[in-house]
Amino acid sequence: MGRLIVVSNRVQAPGDAGVGSAGGLAMALAAALREHSGLWFGWSGQTSEAFTGKVTTRRVGAVNVATIDLDEQDRQEYYNGYANKTLWPLFHHRTDLASYERSFDAGYARVNERFAAALAPLVARDDMIWVHDYHLIPLARELRKRGVRNRIGFFLHIPWPSRRVLTSLPRHQELVEALLDYDLIGFQTVDSREAFQGYVTDTLGGAVSAAGDVELLGRRTRIGAFPIGIDVEDFRQAAASATAQTVHKRMRRSMTGRKMILGVDRLDYSKGLEERFLAYEQFLADNADQIENVFFLQIATLSRDEVEAYQDLRARLDAVSGRINGAYATIDWVPLRYVNRSYRRDELAGVYRAAHVGLVTPLRDGMNLVAKEYVAAQDPDDPGVLILSQFAGAAEQMDAALIVNPFSREDVAEAIRRGLVMPKAERVVRWRELMDGVEAQGVSLWRDDFLMALLEPRSGGGAPAEPPSPFGERLPSGYATA
């Protein structure tokens, strides 16, 4: 293969130690690109008065970065609109929050066309293209229209919705059929993979081969589950840094002998923050002996402030946190510390290590790398306890955590109590099993498994993979994906 070309909605400089862990996409892609002399292409995050299509390139370490600016209409219709007001809530089973507007559809299609038009001239004969996330589902189709015959893979970082939820999306069939122009479609979990396969068979009348490939409209597309992990060695270095140690000592001093429960999330309704606050309130009501002996620190980085649903969520969290502190705080103890700012990864590593309980309770999540980072940051001789939602993708790999139903405040409250009083011997055993999994299923395995699958020969009849054709040659009619 030639270069690896990574395409994502936003481009952040790979290897930047200041990139936060919330979401995890930037650090995962940085780890993938470090071993390939590649290109990272996407939106700069900037808007211009009018769209020009100009590509700006720069060198960051061993990676070439190429970006384009969008115009304000693109940002509103494609990013704030279809991506964050339509697909994001729908894929997280929040149909009550999903907005369907024709201008959103038009903006989404237009920006994917603009991405393809800017990227296609940069693609060399042997390059392999790896497209990321729900913002760019139609990108392969647009690249194929422009004659790009290279191998193109797609990875979805968020959950794939159930068939009945997806069919509430206008033109859902068109969106799914666009995915068939990829050679490989990757999901975080087996559950998401099976949901996609079920949609193809039950709604589109397609078929699934014995190997799990999807067959539809005379084409066959490879499907796989590729659970993402963290760069364990990189995170260990961050956790061992002087900054992490300073933050850890600072947190220990601020605890004044109390135990700390920790949540670290982007402020989003999918993360279950309001339900988590209510569960903590239930814990305080049920465990009078823990009053003044424990506190909950929730770090919730603000995001998507222009979207009304996020504004409403922030207002509710402010109200609930105020009520809890008003009801339970004493003159020298605040039960809930609620912080709306971001922290560096090395700073977060120090906070993770100080926490006796890590509370990761999304209502629905593709993977959730915070759970894995919390485990990796722990003291092997005296580790904390991970409480994990059954609806996080990480739950498929981390069953040694205390698995909870995030919709049940009693379930979460009881898990908090259990985590705080868990004997050290049990904590060590659980942590060791979790850490073994985090080490074995790191970001390198995710990267290698996906890229190897993308390079595999075309399935069906034992036919070898067709070598990449020179750029510019149009696709023949009936082109079949691998």
Image (tube, rainbow, N blue to C red):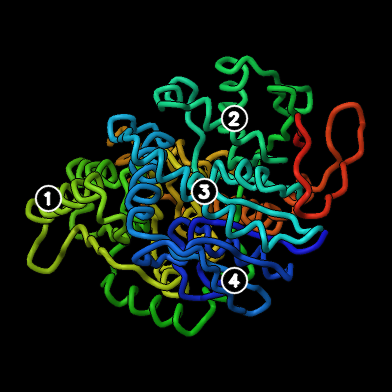
Q: Label 4, on which residue?
A: 65
Structural distance between the alpha carbons of marks 3 and 1: 39 Å
| 10 Å crowding of disc 4: few (<14), some (14-19), many (20+) | many
Amino acid type for the residue under numbered disc 2: Glu
Q: Label 3, on which residue?
A: 112
Q: Earlier in the sequence, mark 4 or mark 2?
A: 4
Amino acid type for the residue under numbered disc 4: Val
Classify the position of the N terminus by image quarter: bottom right
Structural distance between the alpha carbons of marks 3 and 2: 15 Å
Q: Secondary structure at mark 1?
A: helix
Q: Nearer the viewer, mark 3 or mark 1?
A: 3
User: In the rendering, at what x and y percent does residue 395 appear?
Assistant: 52, 41
User: In the rendering, at what x and y percent does residue 274 appear?
Assistant: 25, 44
Q: Nearer the viewer, mark 3 or mark 4?
A: 3
**Where residue 319 is drawn, which disc sits there?**
1
Structural distance between the alpha carbons of marks 1 and 2: 44 Å
Q: Label 2, on which residue?
A: 177
Q: Earlier in the sequence, mark 3 or mark 1?
A: 3
Residue 471 in the image: above or below residue 37: above
Q: Earlier in the sequence, mark 3 or mark 2?
A: 3
Amino acid type for the residue under numbered disc 3: Asn
User: In the rendering, at what x and y percent does residue 32 appear?
Assistant: 67, 62
**Where residue 309 is drawn, which disc sits there?**
none
For the residues labelled 3 and 1, say whether their Cβ atoms are less than 8 Å apart. no
**Which of 63/32 is in front?**
63
Whether residue 218 is visible to the viewer of this picture, yes or no, is yes
Structural distance between the alpha carbons of marks 4 and 1: 43 Å
Q: Secondary structure at mark 3?
A: helix
State the residue lying farthest toward the bottom.
242
**Which of 475/251 is in front?**
475
Classify the position of the C terminus by image quarter: top right
